[in-house]
Image (cartoon, rainbow, N blue to C red):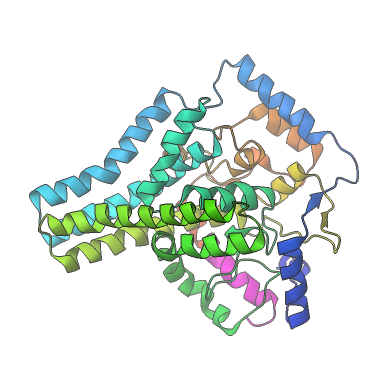
């Protein structure tokens, strides 16, 4: 707990909030290594050598293509089945639940890699597979700005990394304001997590459209943004027509469709947020703050390793399902490669910094980690003296 006490910095005054908001919107962050290390250069060379010496592709192989077919089929075939056969309500809910699991898998194993440019060496294939995000109800441009630009560049930096931005009733950074609602976040977090993808499919893209235009992340012209906004609206109409409109037109009662649709999103949202928390918001990660000049006194690669951890490395089923995102450190260092275990680079990590865990960290199994993810949300409150 002392670890979090050292990190804890509550922005209580309005002046502090305005300063950090101004810095986040205006001042870029620079990563400056004081010791001028060659860590990332050496690591990058070793990674390239690893793939060449072992004759491995950095992108999808036949197994990943088969997995893509399996996950997309698991996402759509239950919908076709329930519309064609219209089973009893209990069986219909089970199909929606199964779709929720598949939906999360598509997001992690297909869409995510494609929009990083990691799925294929062919940009056109990446673009094609990246469109799978539309099937999840999301905007590709907004996702890339939030995830590729903000999260991967400014990992765990408050007010820069949108992935750790506070949600209503949920505090994910030790450097944001503590509110009374956070007192019970250790148990109500599961409720917030369950609506994450539903919020994404309904309102999030419109909120991000306005925010990213305002803070300069979206650098499109006004004419381009009018087209972009129309695309967002079209995506939402298409998504809800497929997953809500078609089942209703097929004769499934409206309330049953709504109940199943919500269940699908609840399950998908919980899965995605737990995977994120286990990689970034646990006690082993740090939450650095830039100086008043916008400087992080570390090179970018070391920053990534300090703010990211691996988990469940030896769980093959989990690795298959999440697309290797349990190797989160490797993913952050080399986002255009499919995440893999890299023994040689990790040996370099061990020699470079004893703090860095790289792929030698992580537990052996997945579900026992889950309480850790939820327990972390209450740790912030305890360190502030309210727990």
Between 40 and 354, the residue placed more toward the observer is 40
Residue at (56, 26) in percent of width and height? 58
In-image side of 371 versus 361 (left or right): left
Find the residue positioned furthest to the front.
223
Q: Position of residue 232 (x, y in %)?
A: 42, 55
Q: Residue at x 15, y 46 (%)?
A: 81
Q: Is residue 237 magenta?
A: no
Task: Check the image and report above or below for 338 versus 99.
Answer: above
Residue 118 in the image, given as x and y percentages of width and height:
54, 33
Name of the residue lying farthest toward the right? 35
Residue pictured at 50% horizontal, 38% vertical? 113
Q: Looking at the image, can residue 318 be seen?
A: no
Residue 382 within the magenta-colored segment of the rendering? yes
Give whichever of 304, 219 is nearer the camera: 219
Residue 83, horizontal then vertical, whole percent: 14, 51
From which residue to which does the magenta span run?
Answer: 373-387
Regarding residue 16, the answer to whether it shows in the image is yes
Q: Position of residue 67 (x, y in %)?
A: 37, 33
Examine the image and state in which quarter residue 348 appears: top right
Residue drawn at x 18%, y 65% as measured from the top left? 256
| Quarter in which the C terminus is drawn | bottom right
Q: Quadrant of the N terminus?
A: bottom right
Look at the magenta stretch and give its main secondary structure. helix
């Amino acid at each position: 707990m002392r670890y979090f006490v050292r990190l804890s910095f509550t922005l209580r005054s309005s002046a502090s909030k305005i300063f950090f908001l101004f810095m986040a919107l205006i001042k870029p962050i620079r990563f400056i290594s004081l010791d001028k290390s060659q860590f990332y250069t050496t690591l990058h060379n070793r990674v390239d050598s690893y793939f060449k010496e072992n004759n491995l592709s950095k992108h999808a192989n036949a197994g990943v293509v088969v997995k893509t077919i399996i996950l997309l089929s698991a996402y759509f075939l239950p919908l076709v089945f329930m519309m064609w056969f219209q089973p009893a309500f209990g069986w219909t809910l089970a199909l929606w639940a199964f779709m929720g699991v598949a939906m999360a898998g598509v997001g992690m194993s297909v869409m995510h890699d494609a929009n990083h440019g990691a799925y294929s060496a062919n940009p056109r294939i990446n673009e094609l597979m990246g469109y799978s995000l539309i099937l999840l109800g999301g905007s590709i441009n907004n996702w890339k700005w939030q995830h590729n630009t903000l999260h991967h560049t400014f990992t765990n930096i408050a007010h820069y990394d949108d992935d750790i931005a506070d949600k209503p009733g949920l505090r994910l950074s030790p450097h944001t304001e503590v509110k009374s609602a956070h007192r019970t976040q250790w148990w109500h977090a599961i409720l917030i997590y369950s609506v994450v993808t539903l919020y994404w499919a309904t309102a999030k893209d419109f909120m991000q459209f306005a925010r990213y235009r305002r803070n300069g992340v979206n650098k499109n012209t006004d004419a381009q943004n009018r087209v972009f906004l129309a695309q967002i609206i079209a995506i939402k109409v298409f998504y809800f027509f497929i997953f809500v409109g078609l089942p209703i037109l097929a004769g499934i009662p409206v309330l049953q469709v709504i109940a199943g649709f919500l269940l699908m999103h609840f399950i998908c949202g919980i899965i995605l947020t737990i995977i994120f928390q286990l990689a970034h918001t646990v006690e082993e990660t740090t939450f650095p703050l830039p100086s008043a000049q916008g400087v992080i006194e570390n090179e970018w690669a070391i920053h990534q390793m300090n703010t990211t951890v691996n988990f469940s490395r030896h769980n093959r089923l989990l690795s298959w399902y999440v697309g290797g995102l349990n190797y989160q450190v490797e993913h952050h260092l080399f986002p255009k490669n499919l995440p893999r275990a890299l023994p040689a680079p990790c040996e370099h990590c061990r020699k470079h910094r004893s703090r860095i865990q790289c792929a030698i960290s992580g537990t052996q199994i997945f579900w026992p980690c889950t309480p850790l993810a939820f327990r972390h949300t209450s740790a912030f409150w305890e360190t502030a003296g309210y727990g």
